[in-house]
Amino acid sequence: RLKLSFMERARFAKNKVAERIFQIMATKNTTLCVAADLTKTTDILNLAEEVGPHICLFKTHIDIVEDFHPNFLKHLQDIAQTHNFILFEDKKFADIGKTVQLQYSESIYKISSWASLVTAHSLTGKGVLDAIRESEGLKERGVFLLAETSAASSLIDGNYTQATVKLALQYTDLISGIVCQSPLFVDQPGLIQLTPGVQLDSIGDTLSQQYNTPEHVVLERGADIAVVGRGITKSADPALAAQKYKELLWNAYKKRIV
Ligand code: UP6
């Protein structure tokens, strides 16, 4: 995986959204996922417009939005289409399958109807993935399964991480990739490694978040896509910051595949 180009890897993808991500990365020259952790819909829409040309994925936490309105999603989908990026709800599903199904398809958010991608914990096992697979929603959907976290205080150990990768490999039609901090599945070119905890000017926050640089996560940790939140959203010029992260990440990827 680490030495192949995204174009080459697209044909190994068994999940449709993963295949699309590879194509977007290869055509837009970007492996940047922005974490839009903002609480006002207008701020999220403005951010999407500003960083849109520089990203492949736009990651939301829809349940932190204060003024949620279904029209907001329509606007967000329009922006995603204009700039060719994918909407990604970082729900981190972790309950029994039936509850996950309700959280995924029902409520005011109806996540399965607009988010091509979601995250899930492997904690409760295969029921979560069966629930997502069997739910109604967009035709092409994918899941990023969380095998490691960027949090210094994480309770996840090596056994959990390995068992998570094993579970992911049993659901390759549904799984777009794995959220992790190290190159866990180098023999699986069709799966995407998504790595959060990326920022240039900080090593962490006061709540156990830990940061690495874009070069480090791509060259040392095996990241395909890097998630950047506050490094971009708190910057004076998010568009410029996104461009900078995009270029650093892309240069590191080019260096890795030669
Ligand atoms: N995230 C992590 N670490 C993980 C998994 N997910 O930070 O292991 C998510 C957070 C947040 C984003 O939920 O949305 O990635 C990171 O934001 P930051 O760059 O502002 O720290």
Image: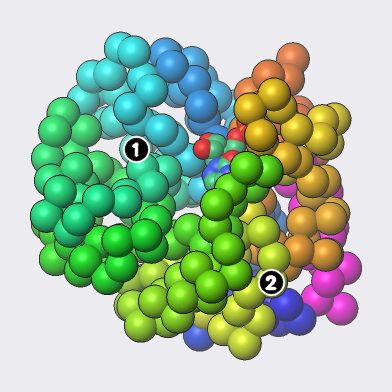
Give the residue at mark 2.
183
Could you tell me how far apart the alpha carbons at marks 1 and 2 are, in whole angstroms?
32 Å
Point out the image quarter for the N terminus.
bottom right
Residue nearer the viewer, 47 or 198:
198
Dot 1: element: helix
Q: Is residue 43 left or right of residue 150?
A: left
Relative to 174, is 196 above or below? above
The image shows residue 161 at horizontal and vertical percentages of: 54, 68
Which of marks 2 and 1 precedes in the sequence? 1
Look at the magenta stretch and give its main secondary structure: helix
| Marks 1,2: beta carbons within 8 A | no
Q: Is residue 247 visible?
A: no
Q: Residue 20 magenta-drawn?
A: no
The image shows residue 73 at horizontal and vertical percentages of: 29, 30
Residue at 37% in and 55% down:
120
Relative to 75, is 212 above or below? below
For the magenta stretch, what is the residue range?
A: 245-258
The image shows residue 170 at horizontal and vertical percentages of: 35, 83
The image shows residue 158 at horizontal and vertical percentages of: 60, 69
Name the residue type under label 2.
Pro
Q: Where residue 77 is drawn, which disc sits there?
A: 1
Name the residue type under label 1.
Gln
Render colour scheme: rainbow
Residue nearer the viewer, 20 or 110:
110
Dot 2: element: loop
